[in-house]
Image: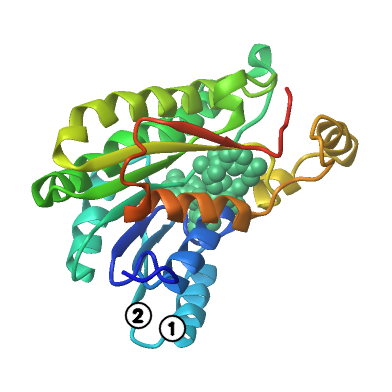
Amino acid sequence: MTDAFPLDGRGVVVTGGSRGIGAAVVRLALEQGADVVFGYHSGEERARALAEELSAAHPGRRCTPLRVDVADAADAGRFAATALDRLDRFDALVNNAGVTRDTLFARMAPRQWHEVIGTNLDSMYTVTKPLLMPLVKQRSGAVVNIASSSGLHGIPGQTAYSAAKAGVVGFTKALAKEVGSRGVTVNAVAPGLIETDMTAAIPEDKADFLKSLIPGHAFGTPEDVAHLVCFLASERARYITGQAIEIAGGLVV
Ligand code: NDP
């Protein structure tokens, strides 16, 4: 491993890798020398275009897109098995897929609650379950779960999302204690407001208000988050585990 390529020759699996933060993680992991399998859900064309672009940019490295609904255990199991099959070695899982269905709790329909919990929290079980044992058996590896400032502080209009992301943090801390003796680290990254399709849906006046809560008055970029994720996925972070690290530009909610 050289300083310039901390993920050299490593195998990385990323869910929700077709857009936004996940796509930035896929891109940076390849730049840092990894082979990557990434999941997408509805955006097949975009996922294939990204994989083609990155495979061409990194000859010798492999970048494989696979469709998966992370809320569905059987689907996630097939995804995990195929991902392991496509990688020569497997070193890091990035649980990144997520959705928001913002609405006040009083107006929240059961479907909105279940979609948010299913994609953001059930996925911690469905995807991590089949991919953890290979890491435990080889006695090295990293799991990086994408939480949110919403899960750390609670944001009105996001009760389901805050609950799911708080659950991600609890899951992270407990699992870190279970597998720490096997050389596997488990950490959560909790982004604040990051410029992706998810935040593009925020109305302009609300976005301006949210920016006023950030000392630098700007949303972060997917690349800001990807650097932290790839660091935690690498050997360099081997002594960091069970943490939820907020990356929010000092956002105060
Ligand atoms: P985007 O909306 O830009 O992308 C979401 C990704 O998740 C896409 O690749 C999408 O695939 C995938 N996805 C959605 N539903 C499913 C599903 N059921 N099964 C599998 N994959 C699915 O999101 P962001 O990049 O903004 O967010 C990434 C993560 O970061 C999420 O966990 C989010 O909660 C978290 N986060 C984001 C913040 C932000 O400000 N953007 C702040 C805090 C946390 P496809 O396009 O193919 O459907």
Can you say which quadrant of the picture contains the N terminus?
A: bottom left
Label 1 sits on a secondary structure element that is loop
The answer to whether any part of residue 125 appears in the image is yes
Q: Residue at x 49, y 85 (%)?
A: 57
The mark found on residue 200 in the picture is none
Looking at this view, is 137 or 157 the one in front? 137
Secondary structure of the residue carrying numbered label 2: loop
The amino acid beneath tag 1 is: His
Q: How is the image coloured?
A: rainbow
Where does residue 121 sit, x and y in percent of width and height? 41, 31
Q: Position of residue 232 (x, y in %)?
A: 41, 48
Q: Identify the residue position indicated by label 2 in the image.
A: 61
Residue 167, by quadrant, is top left
In the image, what residue type sits under mark 2?
Answer: Arg
Query: Which residue carries the number 1 mark?
Result: 58
Residue at 39% x, 37% y is: 187
At 73% from the left and 22% from the top, the residue drawn is 253
